[in-house]
Amino acid sequence: MYDNGLQNQPKLHLYGGTAAVCFEGSSRNDGQPTINIDVAPKPDGRNVDWSQKITLQLSHNELVIVTGIFLGYAPKIQCGRPDKGINIARQTGKVYLSACSGQRIPDSKLSFSSTFPGGTPSLY
C-alpha cells in the first residue's frame, strides 16, 4: 500500500495566455499514486477561473505516457472520459495542452523549457 501523504506535495501551476493548468499528486481508488490535471480558463486573459476547471485523474498508462511526453519520449496523448478530455502534445520547446468538457476551454500553449529546469515537470 502506498503512503497517502500526497496531499502534502506542492501543486505545480502553469499559466498560458488563455488557460492555466495544475498538476497535483493524487492516488487512485486502489491506492496507486497518480496525478490529477486541472485545466481552467482565463476568460479575461488575466485571471484564472478555477471554478470552471476540468479535472482529470490519470490512469497508470496515461501517467506513463504523460511522463514520456515531458521527457521527450512520447509525442502526444488524448486522455478522454465520457464527459471531458485533455490533449497533451510535445512541440519544439513547448507542450501544447487543450481541454474540453461540454463547453470548450480555450487551448493553451505552455512552455516547459523555460518553466522547468531540464524540462521535466513529472519528476518534481
Image (tube, helix red, strand yellow):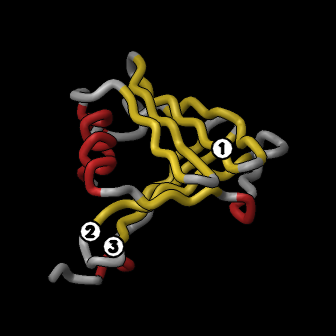
The reply to whether residue 54 is visible in this rendering is yes
Front in this rendered view, residue 2 or 121 = 2
**Residue carrying label 3:** 27
| Dot placed on the residue nearer the N-terminal end, 3 or 1 | 3
- Name the secondary structure under disc 2: strand
- Type of amino acid under label 2: Pro
**Above or below: residue 59 compared with residue 19:** below
- Name the secondary structure under disc 3: strand
Any mark on residue 100, and which? 1
**Above or below: residue 18 compared with residue 74:** below
For image coordinates 31% across by 33% down, the residue present is 69
| Dot placed on the residue nearer the N-terminal end, 1 or 2 | 2
Disc 3/disc 1 C-alpha distance (Å): 23 Å
Q: Quadrant of the C terminus?
A: bottom left
Dot 3 and dot 1 residues touching (CB under 8 Å): no
| Dot placed on the residue nearer the N-terminal end, 2 or 3 | 3
Outermost right residue:
44
For image coordinates 66% across by 44% down, the residue present is 100
Dot 2 and dot 3 residues touching (CB under 8 Å): yes
Q: Residue 5: horizontal and vertical position, in percent?
A: 29, 82
- Type of amino acid under label 1: Cys
